[in-house]
Amino acid sequence: FVLRCDAKWVEHPEHFELMNQQRQFNIRIDAAELEEGVPHYTELQAFDADHIEMGPLFRVPITVILPVTVDESTQFVVTRDLTLKPAEDQRLFVHVPEGADWAMFKFQSHDRDHFARYVFHAVQLLPNESYRSHESYKMVTLSEQGESTQAMAVVGGRTLELCITKWWSSLGDSSGTYTLAFRGNVPIPTAITILSCDATAQFGIGNGLAFEEVHPAITFRHVCHPTRPVDSRVEPLGPRDLFHDGRQIYRLLLTYSFTVHKGSEVCFLRMALIEDLSS
């Protein structure tokens, strides 16, 4: 085989000989000079050495993405100018800094003579989770030199893919500027539980990014109400429920009485002392 690739950042052997067994060859990627934030795609193509005109016999797709990194020097903000055409998307890949839990996206249109509709889409992929768990989607219509602001939840230490598209029916080219600012105000601990025996509960707020002014607000979403049994009985099981030496097996039958209001969203019944015995 004759191996060819148009990308200068891919190093590969020029020839590859394959006989009646599997073989491998090495490919080296030099991404030092690639632009950050955008995907780079190329293919390594293999041709028959005696019949180049037949075209490639197999292809090895290569995709390299270097996410944009933000730090204190940029105040954890990414700013880009762009020109959009109908149904043509612009993508940006950003590494979310550690400690960030939300981001503020702001788009400023530079159009002076017409309305335009835009779609903003942001996604993060996490292991063993659906992409919809960390997705933000918004469609807006902006007037002349209009502005749109959107807040989205993010996960620190992961790559965020941001896609901006002009709606297909909004004709003509459009220009604009967008900024993506990361912020982080993480409660410590993230889940607060107040027991009936505790008079107070203490929590803190961690912020490893820029200075923030916070206005804490607490909303009680779940209530845990302990319930005692109204009746308890020890009863023998069936005639076949015996130990190996013939002794009868008994059960403890507990009867509980509780009321669930119709407006309740979710109700869980937990047996805290015995629910882990089966494992």
Image: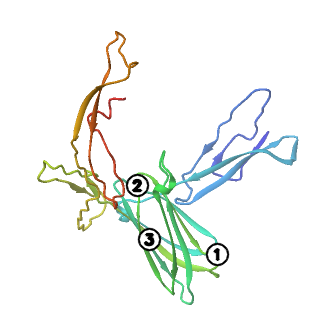
Q: Sequence-wise, which precedes: disc 3 or disc 2?
A: 2
Is residue 113 placed above or below 272 in the rendered structure? below
Which residue of the protein is positioned furthest toward the left in this rendering? 199
Residue placed under numbered mark 3 in the picture: 179
The N terminus is located in which quarter?
top right
The C terminus is located in which quarter?
top left
Circle on res. 168: 1
Residue placed under numbered mark 2 in the picture: 155
SS for callout 2: loop
Picture quadrant where residue 12 is located: top right
Q: CA distance from mark 1 to mark 3?
A: 23 Å
Q: Which residue is painted at 56% across and 60% down in the image? A: 38
Q: Position of residue 132 (x, y in %)?
A: 50, 57
User: Could you tell whether 126 is left or right of 274 in the image?
Assistant: right
Q: CA distance from mark 2 to mark 1?
A: 31 Å
Q: CA distance from mark 3 to mark 2?
A: 18 Å
